Image: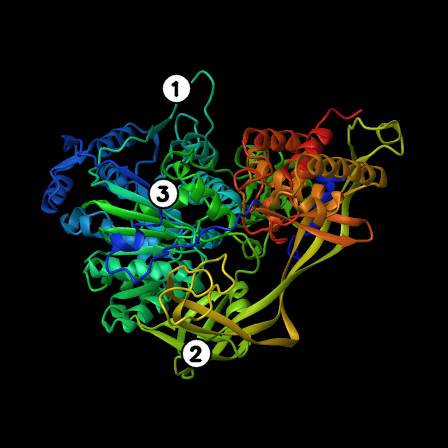
Amino acid sequence: MNPTSKTPPDYGMLLQQFYGIKETAAQPDLNQEDETPETVQDLIASVVTHQETVAAQNPKLIELPEDLPPSLTKALNYRGIHALYSHQNFAYAAINEGKDVVITTATASGKTLGTFLAILKGIIEQNHCCLAFYNLKALASDQATNITELLSTIPEQIRPRFHKLTGDTPTQMRKEILASEPHILGVTPEFLHYQLRTTWKSAHWQTFLSRLKYIVLDEAHTLRGVFGGNVHMLIQRIKLAVDHYAPARSDGSLPSDHLQFVVLSATCGNAVEHCRHLTGRPKQKGKPSRLVWIEKSGAISAGKDLFVLRPSASSHSETAKLVYHLMQQGKTGIVFTNSISSVKTIYNLINKESQRRGLNNIGSQVVTYYSALRAQQREDILEQVRDGRTRWLISTEALESGIDIASLDCSIVRGWPGSVQSFRQAIGRCGRQNPGFAFYLPTTKVMDLYYATHPALLLHGAAEVITFQVPVLLLAKHILCAAVETGIPVSKLKHYFGSDAFKVVQELLRQGQISRNRSSILWTKGFPHRDLNFRGGFNQSLVSLLDQDGEEIEQMSQEIAQREVFQNAIYRCQNGEGKMLTYHVLDLDLETKSARLKQITDTDTFTQATTHSELNIHTRVAGPSSIDIEVATDEAIAARGPDAPCLNLEMAWADIRYVVDGYDVFARRYERACVNQGCLKFHAAISVTRCSNCGKPTRYTEITQMVDTIVFDQPSKIEMTTPVVEVYFNKVARKWLEHITRSLKSQIKQETKEIPKEYRSLWEFSGEYLALHTIGHQLLKAFPIVVRSDTRDANFQIYNNEKGITGVFYNVTPESGVVENLFTRLPEVARKAGEIAQTCSCKTGCGNCLIQHGCPDGNTGLLKSIGLQLLDAISQPQK
């Protein structure tokens, strides 16, 4: 069959070929003082729960290498650089020797300069080329500026040519850039993914690939999960293209064997392993290592003080007050928070606090930064920070990456950012040239509370291990892309794509999606590149936000747009001057990928979408299969045979829908109120300085009140089709679980007169629910170790259906491959999950071993001990 059909591959059939066989105690709130504090010291004095100093470090300098090309030495001297930090010198030497290098020194330690000196030497002396990958367009722009400034002082006739190419680069400009025969291209992975499709008709791309020597992977700690798997496969396709276009080597080796990889990353728990996995170059036995790891920094560091503050239910207000007082003391800084709505709320509260004190100019020196802003806006904001016009940034994780935003005095992390790695990246923004101040201001969410009560983990705990895998669906899609780009020699299929590639290709051949010619080259036609979502998640189509004149004011993914700019929503966004404007959404049209907004007078009203998820299983892929539960209770329950207790598993192909079915309308006020969570008048407006009910000091804070609920006639939906694994108990297993919960309840009643709050779930949920929900969370904790996934690649939710209470594991991105591994390796995953849970000293479950960030079921109905018993029972050897 000629593989030109526009019908997509049957990925469900492909899967069949492979697999057919709270502890949340009430916390005292932040800042319980009589009067509004006048200094930062007053503000935090009574609420600091932990303080620690990160020591300053003197620079370790080494003279510039003697073998640097004179033009490079002059360029460095012109910029005032007469010596290198020790780690920069180490990197220069290693790259010169032909080594692969991974550098994990601290934020702002000069990794880029250490990397590019040797690369520029290779370009000047041997006319090599370099691909530099950046995970964000903004990072690509930032690094382009830094490298271009260095190159600008080199005489033009010998100057290496550097250009940035991203999706924002106009088509004609792309052609002009490639025609100029660039030496270094700064690109995003998605951009090159699409460009490889057209290399066969571009002599300029072919020339560049034939001279490619260096591949730089910046911010490699972000290359995890589905994103990491996609970038790894993209690298394999680049190797294939290099071998296709570069001249054959006289020694018989492949041209791609002589590529050099330079990997730059924040600290992670497995830097060397991750680098080898990412680049596809595992260590070979009996041969010296080709990879050099540089982790010790020789850069200067001014040090910083870290303050961990008491968790607060009014964390937006407290963050705004902290920023206000730090600004009053002349400090500059950045606030990191977890959502765009939080960014805008904090910005608004800073202005409210400033206006309340009669200082209207303060708010004008604060700007927000988030991904929906237009590219030019983001660049302008960073420039304003660098030249001092803007003193404070309120940002999402969009600025965690290594974008140069000058030296800041302070960094505030409002709410747990999701990982130790992200936390350290965030606080690394301060304390570079001058002593810095870092603040962790936790909310009352479970994960925030965990790290607030274990502050030593913030600076001294092990950084997370970075993992990814290349599951069947991801592999199939990249093979189709490579077959379009260059074709794949059958003899090299395993070399580029691994042993699973043969079985994938057999199924694609059977479906007519790929062909094999007389030269044993696998080829196809079409545009399979569009079937790959590099970052994972739901539909990532972009929606343009247009004002009443039709001008684009922001751009966001369709998934976010359906939650933020639904019809009649109140939406706030920042204009080019940094002022927050308020809009009323006229309509959202998903056909044209646009939303029309009308500017209105600022209001204290805001809207919030109401959502739920739906599951529709339509294709059974494999199962049901059973995992025996090895128990030892009464004979009837423990008996072997058809009535033995077991956990059933079924793999299916299902639709997961996120539905926006309406929205709530809220009004907010900034008033003095009681901020004591345990008081009946919590967040009630009170004009005096002490609450009449609890006697605690009152504070100015944001008070919100829901005023209306709107239900859509036609709910907005976004969906994906993804593999799922259902897990459920048979009747005998349910009987055993009820026996366990009854025994545990009886024991608790005998030991205490009052039921401890950490055990109340025993009386609120059935044993079946407790067991399924708990092992669901515990198994998720083990996935990154056993199946090399990222923690965000899969999720788990409880459903009720004809099977009773059912746990459903689903891939957050269809290609992530996590649940397929669970279906075939559940006992192995269960053993590791049990080990992880047992190493934690808590009794009933905590953020380290059980609580799951973003749990769809709200982290209710969890009990560590029941989960441990079940994990042990299903991880025993099966008879």
Question: Is residue 571 shown left or right of residue 308?
Answer: right
Q: CA distance from mark 3 to mark 1?
A: 33 Å
Q: Position of residue 180 (x, y in %)?
A: 28, 55
**Vertical side of 107 occupied by 96: above or below:** above
Question: Disc 1 on helix, strand or loop?
Answer: loop
Residue at label 2? 583
Residue depicted at x 25% and y 40%: 109
Callout 3–callout 2 Cβ contact below 8 Å: no
Residue at label 1? 288
Question: Is residue 795 shown left or right of residue 83?
Answer: right
Q: CA distance from mark 3 to mark 2?
A: 36 Å
Which quadrant is the C terminus positioned in? top right
Question: Disc 3 on helix, strand or loop?
Answer: helix
Question: Is residue 109 shown left or right of residue 703?
Answer: left
Residue depicted at x 15% and y 47%: 154
Q: Which mark identifies residue 534?
A: none
Which of the marked residues, 2 or 1, is nearer the chain's N terminus? 1
Q: Which mark identifies residue 424?
A: 3
